[in-house]
Amino acid sequence: MGQKIFQLVRSFAILYLMLYLGELISHFIPVGVPGSIWGLLLLFLGLTTQLIKLHWIFFGASLLIRYMAVLFVPVSVGVIKYADLLVSQAKALLIPNIVSTFVTLVVVGVLGDYLFAQSSFTGLRRKVLKKRAKEQE
């Protein structure tokens, strides 16, 4: 029981540390990126460089993910509460969202086409197929 409490406290401490570091970065670098996104980027960099071990944050992160639907209830209530404001500003909200969605789709499509044309995934596919063939033998 004591070990689970330690794991939970450690994981929440690391997650909150990343959040507060992200808030600090967004305070000193006002580029319009929220502190929570900076915190996620810091957490991602920490995990990929293995400065932060996955098992250090796994317990708390899995707990948060398990109850994520409950965490979205206040946001949903806020959207319903201000529905009239959202409807009155629909053009200002929808047009940038639609344009950015199409730009993202085009960029991903062009980039994917370029990468497949360069045959960069062909070698990886061969490795996977060879590995599966060896496992089946």
Image (cartoon, helix red, strand yellow):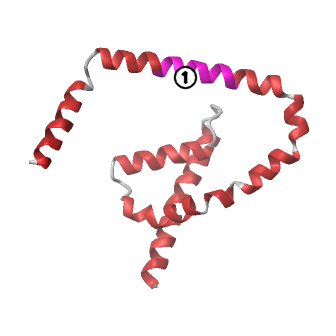
Q: Nearer the viewer, residue 8 or 13?
A: 8
Identity of the residue furthest to the left in this view: 137
- Give the residue pinned by disc 1: 104
Is 126 above or below relative to 6? above
36 sits left or right of 73 in the view? left
Q: Which residues are magenta?
A: 97-108
120 sits left or right of 54 in the view? left
32 sits left or right of 9 in the view? right
The three-letter amino acid code for the residue at tag 1 is Thr
> Image point 40% across, 64% down: which residue?
56
x%, y% of residue 77? 81, 52
x%, y% of residue 54? 38, 59
> Image point 48% across, 65% down: which residue?
11
x%, y% of residue 89? 85, 28
Give the dominant element type of the magenta stretch: helix, strand or loop: helix
Q: How many marks?
A: 1
Residue 102 belongs to the span the image colors magenta: yes
